[in-house]
Amino acid sequence: IPAHTSNLVRALVIIACLTLRVKAEPECNNGEDYVLLKSQSRCPKNIGVSLFRTPNNDPKSLDVCAGICEDYPNCDYFTYGSVVGDKRYGSCIGCDAGAAGKFTDIAVFDLYKLCRSTTTEGLGLGLETTPITSDDSEADAAIPCIPVSMDLAFSTSTLVENNLGGLGPDDDASNAIRYRGVGTVDGESIDLSITVKDGETYDRKGGNGFSCAGDTTSAGDCASGHFGSINMLSGESTTLNFSFIGTESGELVNVPEFYFSVFDIDQSNSVYERYGITGFDSATYDIDNKEAKFTLGEGSDFCISQPASNGNCLYAESTNIGKGCDNPIRPDEIGEFNCLNNQGDSSLRSFLVYYKNTNKFEVHWENPCRVQKNCGKNGRNFLFAFRSGLAPVCETLPPVAPACVPDECDVCDGPGKYTCCDGTETCEPETTCPPSQPISVCIALDESGSVCHEDEEGCPNWNVHIKGFAKNLIQGLDGVANSEFAIVTFAQFSEIDQDLSIASDAMNTIDVLEYRDGWTNTQEAIDQCRMELEKASTDRLKYMILVTDGLPTNNKANEPNQICSSCKDEARVEAQDAKDADISIISVGVNTASFNETILRELASPGMYFSVTGGFDELYKEIEKVNQAANRCISEETCVPDECG
């Protein structure tokens, strides 16, 4: 600015320059649902502001992406994959207000700001606080259904820190209990860290960690288990912070939705148990208070003392004596018991709360003395887990019946022209194809949790694309060879749905298969296919066709885990055993968020790995290649002359 310019003009120029340098976010002034904030940018990673992410290769429209963001009360921004042809096209990422000014530049995404109404009416932001029973109630819908595949669980985790309140037995500086690998969010492993709230005191008598399976004392100091367990001295009270931390990043991680359950709310002759919990969306417990007392909202001193910002509040109090033998063995196995002259129902001494878009929460715990004698000499155990037997069971949507589409040979939903063993194509394989070697085929179909998505009614990935691919595959192979087929499906466990049989039996079996959901037990599916194919006659070529989109996530010990090296190792061993038995393995991979090309190539026989770059709806593109891989002509060398030459 020239020296002779007046102070007023100089001030105006400076203000104008600052205005140009600091660009304000676009405003929502015209009733729009969202506005473009910045092209080629996305929500930041690993700083605790992410709320959700939809899978790659599963495109959503921009409006659907905005709608997903609107369903999260604290979603302020969302990222949309905008480059057609990129695997992230149509993927959607949401983040909260903490992302402001921290966005990441990346060419394949655009960043949008969500425009919310000034009132919450009609936005679905109201909290559902209706209590529901563990049996039936008209309010059952208050607890949303979370698929098993999205569960958090202690059974898959490892105790890596055990020094709550600095009381050991570990001596790390965190003063925490930390369970590593309780689940995954956006492909990142997460831990659960528990600390004593600042300003609170804590003392204990027994051990902390996992509740020991089958241990009626709930010692709480086992190396693994289905429950987390914390011990506190009788007569004491404390508040515990529960936080979800990225295993690698060490940052707070928002979990889109999860259950948290508390069990074994009972008392001794000298000590009560009481729990207060806040911030949840909805809860389920016994509203009749038959074996424990539950108070929602301002009916308890604890909830009255909570600030409004803490949200919903539940207070649980013991009323019945517990004798150790009534402790549940697994979170999903709660119910009636009768032991040591003590009858009751462990489900009535438990509660479950549902959280949404949460990275931390608090639990207040009291062990007040009923009588002063012996009070303060022993401890009580706080038994907790995520999903429990109080959680709703997800309904399986009815299969969607696809419309009949004639193929080029005028066959309803047919495979099209048959590819002969010499590569020629025809609609009349019986009369025009050269003879093929007889084959036995076992088709293993992945029905784990990554296959279906909650927002796709009827699960077309399973009921249309996977089942359709398998049936067309059978039709194609049956038309050019003397074939027999077995069907195996696998999720957390594998099952032989059809022994080796004719093509029509196998296709009828596929028609009635129901989607199961769960983890991915690849090794068991390979093992079952191998054993079935070993029953085939020795003059047949034997093929195993593995159709899957994900990593192996369960092993022989039934220890499911998203990060499971033993699951992959066992699948490799089973695949090698099959190859040693002269079985060729054809792997067909679907490139979704769970996809891992390396393991599928390792499982396949040489030259027999195939994949689709899109979703399950592109499986049909691989039918001809798979058929060709399993279809071999009878050569002169394989011909065995009879006694007449």
Image: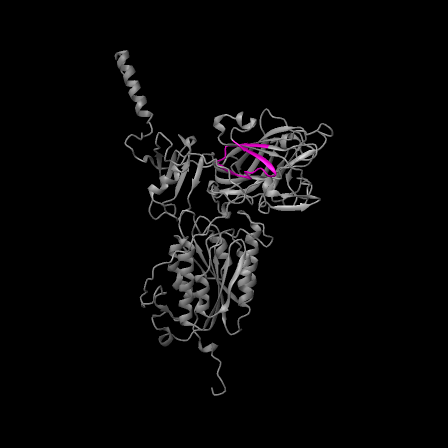
Residue 329 seen anywhere in this rendered image of the structure? no
* Image location (x, y in percent) of residue 139: 47, 41
Closest to the observer, 247 or 168: 168
Residue 316 visible: yes
Q: Residue at x 43, y 30 (%)?
A: 98
The residue lying toward the viewer, choosing from 527 and 312, is: 312
Res 621 → quadrant: bottom left
> In this view, which residue lies farthest toward the right?
373
Q: Position of residue 568 (x, y in %)?
A: 54, 53
x and y, in percent, of residue 40 in the image: 35, 38
Q: Which residue is situated farthest in the bottom direction here?
A: 644
Q: How is the image coloured?
A: one colour
Position of the N terminus, as image quadrant, is top left
Is 156 left or right of 645, judged from the image as shown? right
Which of the two residues, 69 or 313, is positioned nearer the viewer here?
A: 313
Q: Is residue 473 above or below residue 16?
A: below
Q: Position of residue 217 (x, y in %)?
A: 69, 41
| Direction from residue 313 to residue 346 in the image, left or right | right
**Residue 503 colored in magenta in the image:** no
Q: Which residues are magenta?
A: 275-296
**318 displayed left or right of 111:** right
Counting the numbered discs, the total is 0
